[in-house]
Image (spheres, helix red, strand yellow):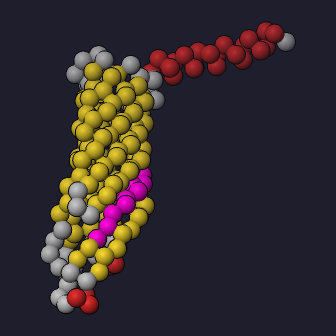
Amino acid sequence: MNKILIALFVPFILLVTQVNAVGGQTASMGYASGHFDKIGGVGEARKVKSNGMNFNHHYQISPDWGVAGSFAWLKGDKNWNYSHSLLAGPTYRVNHYFSLYGVMGMTDLNWGNGAERGSDSDRYSYSDKNTVFTWGTGALINPLENLAFYILYTETRLQPENENYYINGLNIGVGYHF
């Protein structure tokens, strides 16, 4: 009975150690920037910028493929209060120094709006909280054994009151590869 268990257990141990040998990880943090644009509609275009932090984690599952996750926190000026995003997706290692990845997930936006249109009766203000779909694409660069740099572009589309808004984000940072 013990020989059967050992015969079943040894291949499992070899497989687990092989997966762990491939499974390099990179933990990164950096600067996040967002640009909030109103596209079309009535009134003048609105452009609001935001700044914040981004945290990335990359795990290499096989020699070519891996998984990336990203969390960003942005604080805006004017009427855009804050946003949080949580994204994940596959990575493809082009070579030992360079990986490409695509991510998608959700962004939680908290923002307000105030405007005047014409007379006093047309004044309005509101605040809103939305959770919307976000996608992004990026690159991870490992110039040295334990050093990594990343860049990530994200885009979110929001449609309150039948108007189109886009939030474009750019995240850059540095990390440790272990």
- Comparing 124 with 36, the one in front is 124
Image spot of residue 147 (x, y percent)? 27, 21
Res 28 seen here: yes
Image spot of residue 149 (x, y percent)? 25, 30
* The quadrant where residue 72 appears: top left
Image spot of residue 58 (x, y percent)? 39, 32
Query: What kind of secondary structure does the magenta stretch mostly adopt?
Result: strand
* The quadrant where residue 166 appears: bottom left
Quarter occupied by the N terminus: top right
- Comparing 110 with 155, the one in front is 110
Res 95 seen here: no
State whether residue 53 is above or below residue 131: above
Which residues are drawn in magenta?
103-113
State whether residue 90 is above or below residue 107: above
- The question of residue 106 being in magenta is answered with yes
- Comparing 163 with 143, the one in front is 163
Image spot of residue 92 (x, y percent)? 35, 36
Considering every residue shown, the one lying at the far front of the view is 120
Residue lying at 43% horizontally and 30% vertically, measured from the top left: 59
Residue lying at 22% horizontally and 61% vertically, measured from the top left: 78
Considering every residue shown, the one lying at the far top of the view is 3
- The question of residue 114 being in magenta is answered with no
Residue lying at 59% horizontally and 15% vertically, measured from the top left: 14
State whether residue 140 is above or below residue 121: above
Label count reads: 0
Considering every residue shown, the one lying at the far left of the view is 44
Q: Is residue 34 left or right of residue 23?
A: left
Quarter occupied by the C terminus: top left
